[in-house]
Image: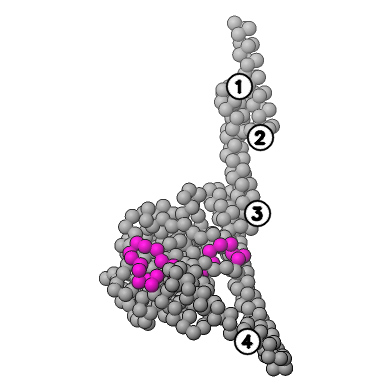
Amino acid sequence: MENKENRTIDRQEAIYQNAMILIEGELYAEASAELARIPGYRDASERKIECDRLAVDKKKDDIYAEADRAAGNPNVRSLQKAIKIFSTIPGWRDADERIEETKRRIDEVVLKERADREEAIRAAKAEEQKRKKRRRTIIRALLISALALVVCVAGVFLFRKYATPAIRYHRGVTLIEQGRPDEAYRILHELDYRDSNDRIRDIVKERLENAEVGSTVRFGSYPKGHITSKEKDDIEWLVLDRDGTKLLLITKQVIDCYPFQRYDRRHDNVAWNTSVLRSWLNGEFSDIAFDKGERQFLVRTRVRADQTPYSTSSDPDTIDRVFVLSVQEAQKYFPDEESRKCTATLYAVEFGAYQSSKGKSSIWWLRTPGGQTITEMLDEGAVPVSSRVACVGTNGAIITVGHDVHTRGYGVRPVIWVNTEATDTLLPPKLS
């Protein structure tokens, strides 16, 4: 009997010593499991309680370290990941403060990226102006020289000045006659020679006239590749509706990302008419996407201001050439979730557009107000502020309660009405 008791004590002591080794190695969960095998032996029960506490703390420390590593990467997606991880350990160390700090860093990164892009665009325009000025200077010098040179030199100059546009023009006309209007469009575009503008108009008109609901048309151009590239590509549009000579178009992909509203705006509801997204679409985006000839096809449309259970006041309708769909319109033109799924261009992704890991789907804005009305204390007192607007999720579901209007990683699918007769008309809303 005594030998049996001694063997039991020896076994318990071995387990206890093994647990101590695990504790020294900071393997608290494993140590707790060992101590649970010898309750009542020495201080095993008290040690187990302490190990359980230390195991929880170590797990939180590991989570905090993972979030800290993600926050150290100055990349919007990595910073968003850090916020998500910090949110799983509220109150632990300075996790709450790190969340707010990371949100501010996201704003700074996005604003810097957009400022860099705008600066690049301005620099490109300035360089183009310099190039044109240099060209005018060279032509002026050639004209002065030509007056002093013999007839043959003047003939060479005249050939360069007048024959080249004629050659390009005739090449474009030949391509049209050969049934290759897309190639002709690239040659005749901005040539401004004889009736080249009319021929460009005819090509665009034919593209639109032959379009049917559900088909794809190319109209306008916008960056599609790397954000460092200055090249623009044709915008592909999906035809949603047809009303006589008018077509309702939406981009097939998310072509950029932009917040619905900025942090510094103060208003009493989330309204399309006051959104920065509306201002951007009808300003900067339109200037980049459509040239003077293409704008003739755009229809000024009365865009209805949706009233929902989340609205806080009556908002006016607007007159826009570019807009985004409402919840009702999205349900009408995209009747199921699969049809609403949408990928983003490389340009939009590099600019911060969110992509799902599976299927590479993006979230895209609608214009219908969402939920979550909060109250802000301003100089004039407590003011209700609606902080959400509806959107389409990566799975194609319409999120009517909406997401935060300040989110910068959500995509934009511009919507336009075009008139194949290229007349400036006012189109009433299709949906009542």
Q: Residue furthest top?
A: 1
Q: Which residue is mark 4?
A: 158
Q: Which residue is mark 3?
A: 72
Q: Nearer the viewer, mark 1 or mark 3?
A: 3
Q: Which residue is mark 2?
A: 26
Question: In the image shown, does 65 or 335 lie closer to the viewer?
Answer: 335
Work out whether 269 lies above or below 147: above
For marks 2 and 3, the one nearer the N-term is: 2
> In which quadrant is the C terminus drawn?
bottom left
Q: How many marks?
A: 4
As measured in the structure, the alpha-carbon distance from the residue carrying label 1 to the one carrying label 2 is 21 Å
Percent x, y for residue 65?
Answer: 63, 47
Looking at the rendered structure, the kind of residue marked 2 is Glu
For mark 4, give the secondary structure.
helix
Span shown in magenta: 206-229
Residue 373: tell me if it is visible: no
Assess disc 3: are there few (<14), some (14-19) or many (≥20) residues with their C-alpha within 10 Å of its C-alpha: few
For marks 4 and 3, the one nearer the N-term is: 3
Q: Is residue 205 magenta?
A: no
Looking at the rendered structure, the kind of residue marked 4 is Leu
Q: Which residue is mark 1?
A: 41
Work out whether 138 lies above or below 387: below
